[in-house]
Image (cartoon, grey):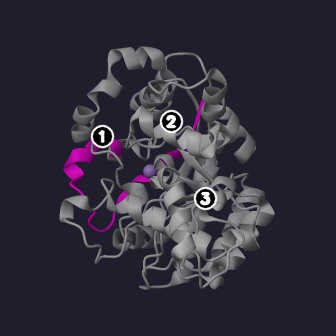
Amino acid sequence: MKDEMDRRDFLRKAAFTALTVPVALQGGLKTAQAKDDSPEASKQGARPMKRIGIEEHWASPAASMGAEPPFDVNTVRIPLRRLGDIEQERLPLMNESGIAMQVLNAGYPRYDGQGDPNAVIATIRKINDSLAETVRKHPDRFAAFAALPMWDPKAAADELKRTATQLGFKGTLILGRTANGEYYDQQKYWVFWEQAEELGAPIYLHPGEPSPDFPGHLELKGPIWSWGVETATHALEIIGSGVFDAFPKTTLILGHLGESLPYLLGRLDEGYVMSHKPVKLKKLYSQYIKDNIVVTTSGKYKPEALICATAALGADRVLFSVDYPWVTPEAGVACFENTPLSDSDREKISHLNAERLLRL
Ligand code: MN
């Protein structure tokens, strides 16, 4: 009882993480993308191909409470309700849209320097145990990415190993930088990358909040813009620090079709030639993006964007995802099925790539 009270108390104080906040502001995007949600799209979405989504959020109701999110929570009441659910809405919606499997990730507290960090690590372990229990009830429908105490690289490496070897987790989904603003390109994080490479565990770098002095208007904070540029910047910092030269077998997963990076391969290489080079990299940026990064279709997008990502990286490097519950399975499938692709590419993106990468 006291344990539960401590946990609740902690979670109330914890920062509101990107996991618990929406990528889609339901009303607005629905209107803006009405074409993608058309009945015709839904009909196409019913074509019988196995689909596996890997940016699919889950959280205990307690874990969704915290500091003020950077958007109007009144616009996302339904996703917030669905976050902790499995049986009532999630499975029926997956069935309706032909989603065979979701790789779930859990919200976790981001330690902000207050209180006892070991207590927060203990809470994260409990959340992972609870997620494992959820997966065990439907092992053919769900798999899991671990939550990790990323402010402590050694503890994060240890929990990645525990969840992979003891709970059967497939890697991790982490929410951008730490609460005190550290990126995972720093040398002290290399113990984490080394462990990820040894386990063959992909690291899903999910959007998180940029620095509070992000120089945008208030309306540009959150999924509309700030999360994407922040995540793309973080990925480029990881490349630039030489992580992928030191650990060439690691895989970084980016959502939202690569947070714009597939569009920029030429520009990155052209610019790098002119750049200062504090770390001498073995390859061009575009080559690390092709070799060490895979991207998912999470969120809503235009067909042109998926065509660009697939052409830039290859169909082996793009994975279907929905971003449930912020995007509905129906809308996620409609965006995907509205994109003209060869049957072979569609099959890779729908499920073959996820099965290979995550050993499902
Ligand atoms: Mn997401």
- x and y percent of residue 97 in the render? 48, 24
Secondary element at image label 3: helix
Q: Quick check: marks 3 and 2 in contact, CB under 8 Å? A: no
Pointer 3 local density, CA inside 10 Å: few below 14, some 14–19, many at least 20 = many
- At x 63% / y 21%, what residue is drawn? 343
Instruction: Indicate the quadrant where residue 17 lies.
Output: bottom left
Q: How far apart are the alpha carbons under marks 3 and 2?
A: 17 Å
The amino acid type of the residue labelled 2 equals Ile
| Front in this rendered view, residue 276 or 327 | 276
- At x 66% / y 32%, what residue is drawn? 348
The amino acid type of the residue labelled 1 equals Ile
Q: Quick check: marks 1 and 2 in contact, CB under 8 Å? A: no
Q: How far apart are the alpha carbons under marks 1 and 2?
A: 31 Å
- x and y percent of residue 161 in the render? 74, 65
Which residues are drawn in magenta? 51-79
Q: Is residue 281 above or below residue 227?
A: below
Q: Would you say residue 52 sits in the magenta stretch?
A: yes
Q: Is residue 27 above or below residue 273?
A: above
Pointer 2: what residue? 307
| Foreground label between 3 and 1 | 3
- At x 59% / y 74%, what residue is drawn? 240
